[in-house]
Image (cartoon, grey):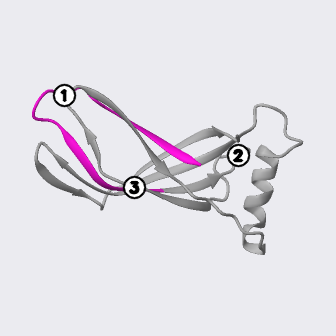
């Protein structure tokens, strides 16, 4: 699974940035729970493979490759059941599951100034297609 990140920068010079480090922690959420979150299950980690430049007046899309392996074990039984319910062969279309992606550990430079945002996290929740 690849995680695509889009950043729009409508600013003029000197507001150019380079993202040097970025991690994204992925969690499975229960879209059918009363609060649409249910029990949260950690799924994996995506890491920025190389720095990304966000130029002035630009729209930049980059990919964080994510490698997810869910082992068949008692600890992962609820997660596997959820994914089977959301994405299994007997699931009616549209086949989607809900994820929380937490962007974290960001180190960047903006307008030539180094910025350490590693203490800040940005959580985003959305439905994703199962394909």
* Mark identifier at residue 34: 2
Are the residues tagged 3 and 1 within 8 Å (C-beta)? no
Return the x and y of residue 63 as percentages of the image width and height.
Answer: 45, 44
Q: Which residue is mark 3?
A: 49
Mark 1 closeness class: few <14, some 14–19, many ≥20 residues within 10 Å? few
Are the residues tagged 2 and 3 within 8 Å (C-beta)? no
Q: CA distance from mark 3 to mark 1?
A: 26 Å
Element under label 2? loop
Return the x and y of residue 8 as percentages of the image width and height.
Answer: 32, 30
Of pointers 1 and 2, the one earlier in the residue sequence: 1
Q: CA distance from mark 1 to mark 2?
A: 41 Å
Of pointers 2 and 3, the one earlier in the residue sequence: 2
Mark 3 closeness class: few <14, some 14–19, many ≥20 residues within 10 Å? few
* Mark identifier at residue 11: 1
Q: Is residue 90 left or right of residue 27?
A: right
**In this view of the protein, which residue sits in the foreground, 60 or 77?**
60
Element under label 3? loop
Element under label 1? loop
Quadrant of the frame with the C terminus? top right
| Residue drawn at x 57%, y 40% as measured from the top left | 126
Return the x and y of residue 103 as percentages of the image width and height.
Answer: 41, 52
| Residue drawn at x 63%, y 39% as measured from the top left | 128
* Mark identifier at residue 50: none
Q: Is residue 58 left or right of residue 5?
A: left
| Residue drawn at x 69%, y 50% as measured from the top left | 30
Of pointers 3 and 1, the one earlier in the residue sequence: 1
Q: Number of marks in the image?
A: 3
Return the x and y of residue 79 as percentages of the image width and height.
Answer: 73, 60
Q: Is residue 7 left or right of residue 24?
A: left
Question: Magenta segment, which residues?
Answer: 1-24
**In this view of the protein, which residue sits in the foreground, 31 or 34?**
31
């Amino acid at each position: 699974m690849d995680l695509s990140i889009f950043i729009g920068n409508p600013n003029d010079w000197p507001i150019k940035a380079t993202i040097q480090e970025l991690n994204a922690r992925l969690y499975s959420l229960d879209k059918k729970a009363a609060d649409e979150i249910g029990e949260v299950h950690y799924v994996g980690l995506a890491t920025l493979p190389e720095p990304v430049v966000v130029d002035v007046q630009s729209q930049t899309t980059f990919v964080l490759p994510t490698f997810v392996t869910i082992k068949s074990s008692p600890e992962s039984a609820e997660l596997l059941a959820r994914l089977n319910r959301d994405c299994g062969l007997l699931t009616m279309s549209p086949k989607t599951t809900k994820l929380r992606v937490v962007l974290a550990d960001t180190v960047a430079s903006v307008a030539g100034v180094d910025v350490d945002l590693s203490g800040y996290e940005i959580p985003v929740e959305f439905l994703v297609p199962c394909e």
